[in-house]
Image: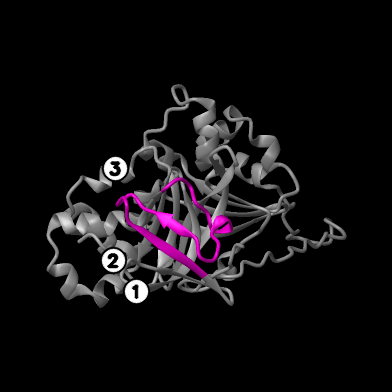
Amino acid sequence: MKKNLSFLGWALLLALPFLFVACGDDDEDPDPMPVPMSIVEIASGDTQFSTLVAALTQADLVSVLEGDGPFTVFAPTNAAFTAAGIDLTTISDAALKEVLLYHVLGGAKIASGDLADGQTYASTASTYGPDATQLSILIEKSANGVVVNGNTNVSTADVDATNGVIHIVDQVLLPLDVVGHASANSNFTSLVGALVAADGDLVSVLSGDGPFTVFAPLNSAFSAIQSTVDGLTTEQLAKVLTYHVASGNVRSDVLTDGMEVPTVNAPEKFTVNISGGVVTLTDAGGGISKVLLTDVQATNGVIHVLESVIIPGNL
């Protein structure tokens, strides 16, 4: 049974109703309220979004974003499309559609004030695999503003529309694979560094088609066993890291209590334990790691976040 777990300020995202007040008499009101507009109408009326509007038209998404919603849209400017090197005359309509949907959170109007400080993973309208699993994005709010996927800044937040809200971003968001998600999150710098240092070119491997299920330890997990990590050879480090990877897109709803999970470090396995809403993993030596967050969906697999590093038996 799938468990709902919290991680680093995981936020309950609340959609706030938006009330428009009609003007009673334009002749008596020298400064009438602006006419409410939809997301598409706002984008169409602003020249900095001409490429976005053309892309939505090409991908046949205009009618979707004219719907009731509510939608939260991260809207790239013309300059963002240019910087990304996206040419509407050469990109396929299918690929363009998935990129555009990756900028949309469906079913919720999420203003910047609805976000808690810290990190939140959200599900986008872009999907992965035959089950059309929604791809994830990382949203991080701080005193400096809102950043998406580690390096895309919200330059203007909270442009209200009748069917949602627009946040203007300075880069085009491209769907991330499991390595991309790890690299985008500052809490996984130790994991990424270990992947680079280990034998087996693991960054390239985990950037492949997969799918992969990655149980990803936080920086604090590596720090807790730093002396052990420092004593590993690059071959042993690869064994530790591949012990955190399983084949397939194994989401939390298929994990069961007592389930043994075969890893890429064959024939090593670990055991899943579920009790009282808490999910833990037991490694080959009896060490236990708590699962802090599940189901960060990437383009080539899924990530679950671990509190501790698990150790295989074949070091």
Please tell me whether residue 141 is drawn above or below residue 82 in the rendered image.
Answer: below
Q: Quadrant of residue 219?
A: bottom left
- Cβ atoms at labels 1 and 2 below 8 Å apart: yes
Query: Residue 223 vs residue 122: left or right?
Result: left
Could you say where residue 117 lies in the image, as x and y percent from the top left?
A: 48, 73
Could you say where residue 112 lies in the image, as x and y percent from the top left?
A: 55, 66
Q: In terms of secondary structure, where does tag 2 sit?
A: loop
Please tell me whether residue 90 is drawn above or below residue 65 in the rendered image.
Answer: above
Between 103 and 175, the residue placed more toward the observer is 175
Residue drawn at 73 percent across, 63 percent down: 18
Please tell me whether residue 50 is drawn above or below residue 149 in the rendered image.
Answer: above
Image quarter of the C terminus: bottom left
Q: Is residue 21 visible?
A: yes
Query: Which residue, given by chain and number where applicable, does mark 1 sit on?
Result: 287
**Dot 2 crowding, Cα within 10 Å, few <14, some 14–19, many 20+:** many
Q: Amino acid at mark 3?
A: Val
Residue drawn at 83 percent across, 60 percent down: 23
Query: Which residue, given by chain and number where applicable, does mark 3 sit on?
Result: 205
The magenta stretch spans which residues? 247-273
Residue drawn at 48 percent across, 71 percent down: 7
Please tell me whether residue 275 is drawn above or below residue 207 in the rendered image.
Answer: below
Residue drawn at 41 percent across, 32 percent down: 86
Image quarter of the N terminus: bottom right
Tag of residue 311: 2
Q: First in sequence, mark 1 or 3: give its number.
A: 3
